[in-house]
Amino acid sequence: MDEFQDYVLLRNTYHAAIREVSTKLEILDDEFQVRYDYNPIHHMECRLKSPQSLFEKLERKGLDIRLESFYKITDIAGIRVICNYIDDVYAVASLLLQQDDIKLLRRSDYIKNPKESGYRSLHLVVQIPVFLSDRTEMVPVEIQFRTIAMDTWASLEHELKYKRVGGITSKMEAELKECAEAMAEVDRKMEQIHKEL
Ligand code: GTP
Ligand code: MG
């Protein structure tokens, strides 16, 4: 029962961390609106990892199902930031990282170095303090920054991959990778047009 209470408290702390980081991002986006009449963030999606996928991940990583193991999982709190253009991705990410209470734990730039699948996004794992009644918790939050085109590809690829029981064929994989490259080309062209305006 105590463990359950601790788990509920911990989930609440992760939820607080998501709200803190998403508020920071909204504040930056609002400031851009006021200063430049432009919103770099198209929209955001926040999620707290479900107990089931958390347990599955612990198992996959060979970790015990206990609270101490949670600290090894850095994507319990997740935020997806969908930006209009590639430049916006780097601008918003670097403004967030400049903030005093944000500590960078990991940065994976899958835009400069796309994954084998063709997947593109900038992943940051940051740590943010959450002030509780009796202590301050440093909570990790995984932020995935991507453009609308990258998000379209990732959503559809995910959907296609999980729809087929045996997974997708290598021919489909190659075709999806081509789609990712075509999307990247669209991103470059659209950004160019935006810059010329
Ligand atoms: P995990 O242990 O699975 O978190 O791997 P990791 O720590 O190496 O994380 P990684 O940087 O690979 O990012 C994992 C997350 O990125 C996933 O939960 C997806 O949201 C996203 N992702 C990574 N690769 C792909 C991909 O090929 N396709 C799609 N659609 N999403 C991906
Ligand atoms: Mg991860």
Image (tube, grey):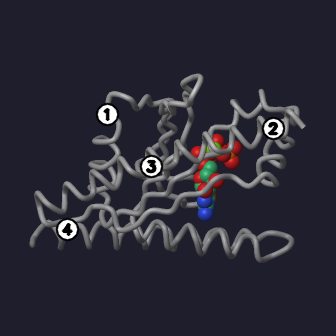
Relative to residue 10, is residue 45 drawn left or right?
A: left
Can residue 13 be seen by looking at this rendering? yes
Cα separation between marks 1 and 3: 18 Å
Residue 192: x %, y % from top left:
19, 68
| Amino acid at circle 2 | Lys
Cα separation between marks 4 and 2: 42 Å
Give the mark nearest the N terminus, 4 or 2: 2
Residue that appears at 35% across and 36% down: 97
Q: Which residue is mark 1?
A: 99
Circles 4, 2 touching at the beta carbon (< 8 Å): no
Q: Is residue 7 above or below residue 195?
A: above
Nearer the observer: mark 4 or 1; the answer is 1
| Amino acid at circle 4 | Gln
Give the mark nearest the N terminus, 4 or 1: 1
Cα separation between marks 2 and 3: 23 Å
Near mark 4 (Cα within 10 A), the count class, few <14, some 14-19 or many ≥20, is few
Give the mark nearest the N terminus, 1 or 2: 2
Near mark 2 (Cα within 10 A), the count class, few <14, some 14-19 or many ≥20, is few
Q: Which residue is mark 2?
A: 61
Q: Which residue is mark 3?
A: 122
State which quarter of the image contains the C terminus: bottom left
Residue 55: x %, y % from top left:
83, 46
Ligand 2 lies under 8 Å from the Cβ of mark 1: no
Nearer the observer: mark 1 or 3; the answer is 1
